[in-house]
Image (cartoon, coloured by chain):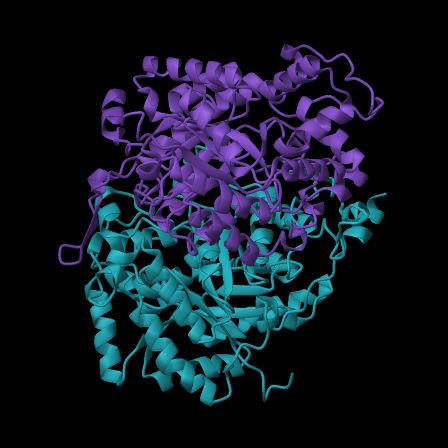
Chain colours: A purple, B cyan
């Protein structure tokens, strides 16, 4: 594909009712509909009308609040991603369905199976955002006093992804025969045990579901730490990542794509999609007013709490209009390391108070906030896309449904006019729309190697 | 409710493409559609047209075949229940969605959350069939050399159900406020940690999803062992059970309902629904031909293998037209104890060969096979229903879609005409249709007790 007709990939980040921490207070947000499936169905159909490659659901295994006040001020009820994506699969046709599942509090057999099932249900539209869990609150819901160390989480994640991939391959593509006459529903010799015995998992297989439509559901990752980059270079097909400046994004893009060759992969087998939090106005002034509205609706406790959790340091004891306290070194952080670094750098660079910093991150949560008219937002995306910083973007509407509708009705037509984005879905599967090839099944070779 | 207008409850057992072990070979079975969602959607809509209370999905965590031949002769690819039920939730309106989830290879936080999510998605139609896992093959997919002992499995199951119930209650019904003005999305004082610390689990809570629409999704159980009966009397709202004779069914019915008072429950808080495998013909002769067809399509290896797994004894070394070998005592069985006893008794009572026994159980798998015209089948159901053997039935169509369509179009109208079954859905939730009350939330009392 030449640069002339290279098209960007787009994900729609479905945080209900919006990506902003106080989205639910936005006058046009349908906060009363957070547990209403019909509302979310309409959002998915809007994203599909916009020809988004995929909709994306984040996840977590605990309420995100350290105290009763914040618990009441923030949205802590959400659909579990698998049930929601599956329900959406039967009322959409083309859009990819990407769900976050942690490798920390699940078993590979269950996860391989659920994604295979979603992929069959949706005729090849499933994707897995692989994450590790890093909060104490989540550990406490799964029999642990504290969560795993960063290095242990990544070791477990690597083995987890490997076992899941093997399970997806445990049925060869040609295994199903369905011949009533000869009583051969399947060719038993094409369904394989995987006999995995590793440090974390011991899994015999085969899976009890045929190979997914896409071979493997698309594997998405988000970590930007050293371990995260290496895992992504080896196994990811999409990366969701967070950068404030084009220089950071370009460095990351070159770094990760540069690591792929040693795993026998070419750079276009991985799509790097930074997050964008678009604040859209018909005029610059309208966009500015929109931004101020979003700042004003943040309850102070929620803002401080969000910031505290993002930098893994409790800020509630410090004056909100004063500077950040001295922060620990990166090595001491056993949470989201890359997010910690990004925020620490930002606060130092711009000399921000605690309030200014939480206002800055309450919407984009560390991703790039882009404010302006539809064509200004398209300009920004085009600049990153054409200058080695991104293959596409994960769009984070501030509030719903308006933030998504505005993007679909106002920004996407500009991108399409400039030849930067599709006007029709090209393929039937998520993989085809992303321009990723269907993975070969390597189970037979792997079994031979072991013997 | 007087006996005059007491109505039976009906479940539709969705084993795809039929409950018979060789269903897929039936000339009218749509075997090529086992992984086709549109096919299953049509089945669900057929069951809903028949006013079934619920459709029911069994589950397992491994392929069900001991060797390559049987692996090829039987259907070992299936949708994972949660993804399938969720996909069905958005294309049905009234029918209950009951999924099997094992307490052996899952975590209570994940299970509580998924059922809460399905209950919200479906506006109150979710049900949980609680099982324990008892095969070596499943253990091998979850890091274990052998599966848990029967008694350990039940201890874990009891605690598991208790934790899940507490998590469902961790949000009070009135917790959501959604008041934009005062920045109160929820009343934080009505969302509670559960702080469970038990022998098997340590779970802090609260859940990250509001209390289910039904309070608790309906809790279904199937075990008929001593431990299973006690657990059911304490916690179950529906029991799926397997009996060959009305006497056995009556004994079980009286036994379990008799145990409920010591847990402060009244007998009508539990619906006992034995399985029925209906072999329907327009005439008795047609039904007999249907039955013979079902016997003839069973590959010998599959029949022996199914029987072996059901009695936890490998029969492949014995002559298929000879008698069963000497079987171990019930105490030595670490599998499905009640199913073992049922089959052992049946073989002895009727002096059956291995082949005769597997032919007998290949369809109903230990449940009651009822063969005849629609009105004969209705007669049988009426007899059990009116004589203290059943509150309703779990219907197991031999093959799909025909077996279900015949039941809906031919048997259900007879039951309706006799006033034994509804002609319209009475309620909006599964719980309402089953005549079960919405459980009160006891979390506040439980927390007080602990302090």
Q: What is the residue that sits farthest to the left in this orientation?
A: A181
| Visible residue check, residue A112 | no
Q: Residue at x 29, y 71 (%)?
A: B402
Along the line of sight, the residue nearer the viewer: B208 or A71: A71
Residue B51 position within the rendered picture, expressed as x and y whole percent measured from the top left:
47, 75
Residue B164 position within the rendered picture, expressed as x and y whole percent measured from the top left:
64, 49
* The C terminus of chain B lies in quadrant: top right
| Visible residue check, residue B246 | yes
Along the line of sight, the residue nearer the viewer: A155 or A14: A14
Q: Residue at x 26, y 46 (%)?
A: B71
In the image, residue A71 sits, relative to residue B321, either above or below, namely: above
Report whether A26 appears left or right of B14: right
In the image, residue B189 sits, relative to residue B291, either above or below, namely: above
Along the line of sight, the residue nearer the viewer: A316 or A295: A295
What is the count of numbered marks? 0
Report whether B35 appears left or right of B27: right
């Amino acid at each position: 594909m030449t640069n002339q007709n290279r098209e960007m990939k787009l994900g729609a980040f479905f945080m209900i009712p919006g990506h902003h921490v106080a989205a639910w207070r936005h006058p046009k947000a349908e906060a009363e509909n957070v547990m209403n499936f019909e509302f979310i169905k309409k959002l998915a159909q809007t994203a599909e009308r916009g020809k988004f490659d995929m909709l994306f659901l984040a996840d977590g295994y605990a309420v995100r609040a350290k105290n009763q006040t914040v618990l009441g001020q923030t949205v802590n009820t959400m659909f579990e991603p698998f049930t929601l994506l599956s329900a959406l699969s039967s009322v959409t046709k083309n859009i990819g369905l990407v769900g976050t599942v942690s490798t920390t509090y699940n078993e590979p057999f269950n996860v391989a199976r659920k994604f295979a099932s979603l992929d069959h249900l949706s005729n090849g539209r499933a994707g897995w955002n692989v994450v590790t869990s890093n909060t104490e609150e989540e550990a406490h819901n799964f029999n642990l006093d504290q969560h795993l160390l960063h290095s242990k989480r990544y070791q477990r994640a690597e083995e987890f992804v490997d076992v899941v991939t093997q399970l997806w391959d445990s049925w060869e593509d040609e295994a199903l025969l369905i011949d009533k006459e000869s009583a051969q529903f399947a060719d038993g010799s094409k369904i394989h045990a995987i006999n995995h015995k590793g440090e974390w998992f011991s899994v015999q297989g085969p899976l009890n579901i045929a190979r997914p439509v896409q071979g493997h559901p698309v594997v998405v990752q988000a970590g930007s730490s050293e371990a995260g980059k290496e895992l992504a270079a080896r196994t990811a097909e999409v990366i969701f990542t967070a950068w404030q400046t084009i220089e950071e994004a370009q460095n990351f893009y070159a770094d990760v794509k540069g690591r792929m060759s040693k795993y026998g992969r070419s750079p276009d087998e991985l799509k790097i999609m930074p997050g964008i939090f678009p604040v859209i106005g018909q005029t610059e002034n309208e966009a500015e007013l929109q931004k101020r509205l979003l700042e004003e609706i943040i309850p102070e406790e929620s803002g401080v709490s969000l910031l505290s959790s993002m930098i893994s340091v409790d800020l509630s004891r410090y004056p909100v209009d004063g500077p950040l306290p001295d922060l620990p070194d990166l090595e001491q952080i056993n949470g989201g390391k890359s997010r910690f670094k990004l925020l620490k750098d930002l606060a130092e660079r711009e000399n921000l108070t605690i309030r200014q910093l939480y206002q800055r991150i309450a919407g984009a949560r560390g991703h790039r906030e882009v404010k302006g008219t539809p064509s200004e937002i398209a300009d920004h995306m085009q600049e990153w896309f054409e200058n080695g910083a991104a293959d596409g973007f994960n769009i984070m509407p501030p509030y719903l449904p308006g933030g998504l509708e505005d993007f679909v009705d106002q920004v996407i037509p500009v991108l399409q006019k400039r030849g930067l984005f599709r006007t029709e879905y090209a393929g039937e599967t998520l993989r085809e729309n992303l321009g990723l090839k269907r993975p070969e099944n390597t189970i037979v070779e792997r079994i031979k190697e072991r013997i």
